[in-house]
Image (spheres, rainbow, N blue to C red):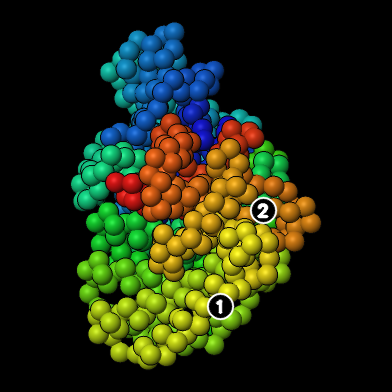
Amino acid sequence: MRIEDYALIGDMQSAALVGRDGSIDWLCLPRFDSPACFAALLGGERNGHWWLGPTGRPSATRRRYRGETLVLESEWDTEGGTVRLIDFMPPRHANPDVVRIVEGVSGTVEMSTQIRVRFDYGRIVPWVRRTNGHLQAIGGPDSAWLHAPVPLKGGDYAHNATFEVSAGQRLAFIFTWHPSHEPMPVEIDPEVQLAETEGMWADWVARCTYQGPWREAVVRSLITLKALTYSPTGGIVAAPTTSLPENIGGVRNWDYRYCWLRDATMTLEALIDAGYLEEAESWRAWLLRAIAGRAQDLQIMYGVAGERRLPEVEVGWLPGYEESRPVRIGNAAVDQLQLDVYGEVMNALYMSRISGLAPDDRAWAIQRELLDYLETHWEDPDEGLWEVRGPRRHFVHSKVMCWVAFDRAIRQVERFGRTGPADGWRKVRDRIHAEVCDRGFDPERGTFTQSYGSEELDAALLMLPMVGFLPPDDPRVHGTIAAIERELSVDGFVLRYPVSQDNAVDGLPGDEGAFLACSFWLAEAMAMTGRRDDAERLFERLLALRNDVGLLAEEFDPRLGRLVGNFPQAFSHVPLIHTARALS
């Protein structure tokens, strides 16, 4: 299936991808970053999947989320009648559950199901037994139970069933994971859990303060961001998947099931703008726990509970999505130096304060230590926000975000009476500003460049007016926007940076699609510089790229007309929200 053929369900601790054909092809339990027990997304059905739908396996005639929830409904119109499949993961109590309710809408429809549980990313074929009419799969530390209302027949390391459902009938299937050393979990009541899940989402969405013209898109994006939040800690993952390719068949395949400080801080700002201060407070608490320690040990990403060691390995037994190898688990970018995250963290904590969160002396102490470190290291080259695997450079965006770090600290002193060497911070802030305008600007072309002395452009430069580095009416801002439109646009959508044949910038072969966050940034920059009509046209084109249930991946490949990259991607839904607010 295409990436956009999947929908998301989740319980704010993990998530599953459900295809148009009714197959769950990706599910990691018990956490977002746990090994997958269904990994067909990155291989085939023998790597684990759970299909449930009309016999013959047609794609759903239509599907939707139930109102403003994460409860998915897929419907098939067949010769015998119409059937509906309701998929959801209820808020977690003791163990993670996936509930699938088959509902007859009209006539009688023959249904089939097949389940293959494969622990450890499709590698471990579990031992399966029947207990009290239910299936239990055990493999090492993992155990899963399937409670089915119809008899399942084993064969070829899978379990299958064919049955009929008539109008008015409802049959519930429940998949439950738990540690293999624990006793059989208590079976949940699917109908009670359905009502509880819908009620939870309805209550959460009711707190949304956005009432603009794009409310449907904004609310769906907010729900997606909430679904990517690890509720026990407040950490926010970039995506629930790994190794969905940025270039079909290529090697640009990364594990995004972790908490990037940059992505999380941008997500936090979107939630704050929509009135979700509880999430802001939880995230601030997660952040302070994760980064506690020496300032020089700050990482760009952490595990959902704040783990620091995320070693990258290649999973050789999975062929990858559409043969896009390698499949990677973990992310080596964890060891990179990306100076922009200091600015992202300082800006997010400042936004938290002006949104109404109570002051936190520990948070301010940590911020001061971060600034002490940055004061002596902002002049260092780094890998930049795009995590290039080429040589370190003096990336302009990184320097600008260092400026943001000191600027937001000064604002906290001036606005909230915090103590600190504000005069010294002002001197550093002014030095950074002057250096960026001198060394990072190409006067002949009238544009800022990706790094000092380079000719390449970088779509992250669109953020200069958004973070307040320069006002929107500055000619250098207009020149940079024009250059990016001219040199980094493909069919109106924006690339992150030019991918050269010699791989000089990022050290990787192959191309990639247009980066959706960058395209939203262009729309927002257009709106800020008075080009509202252009901004709205681009924004509507970007909204049209969402799949049928309102989800976006990381990138869009204009050549193939397909979404590419990990899915759904917080870094795409966050700027959607910001752009909608800018246009509203």
Q: Nearer the viewer, residue 1 or 519?
A: 519
Q: Classify 10 Å Cα crowding around label 1: few (below 14), some (14-19), many (20 and above).
A: some
Which quarter of the figure has residue 379?
bottom right
Camera-side residue of 343 and 403: 403
Disc 2 marks a residue whose amino acid type is Pro
- The single residue placed furthest to the top in the displayed view is 79
Residue 96's x, y, as percent?
A: 39, 50
Disc number placed over residue 498 in the picture, else none: 2
- Residue pointed to by mark 1: 435
Q: Is residue 70 visible?
A: no
- Foreground disc of the pair 2, 1: 1
Q: Judging from the image, what secondary structure is the residue with disc 1 in? A: helix
Residue 101 at x, y percent in the picture: 35, 30
What is the x, y in percent for residue 134? 43, 37
The answer to which of 270 and 68 lies nearer the viewer is: 270
- The residue that appears at 42% across and 44% down in the rendered structure is 535
In the image, residue 488 sits, relative to residue 5, either above or below, namely: below
- In the rendered image, the vertical position of residue 147 relative to residue 446, given as above or below: above
Residue type at numbered disc 1: Glu
Q: Residues within 10 Å of mark 2 (few under 14, many from 20)?
A: some
> On the picture, is 561 further left or further right than 576?
right
Identify the residue at image location x=39%, y=77%. Answer: 407
**Mark toward the start of the polypeptide (2 vs 1):** 1
For mark 2, give the secondary structure.
loop
Q: Nearer the viewer, residue 274 or 233?
A: 274
**Cα distance between the residues tagged 2 and 1:** 24 Å
CB atoms of marks 2 and 1 within 8 Å: no
Residue ID at (39%, 81%): 367
Which quadrant holds residue 419? bottom left
Residue at image point 41% right, 59% down: 473
- From where the camera sits, is residue 167 visible? yes
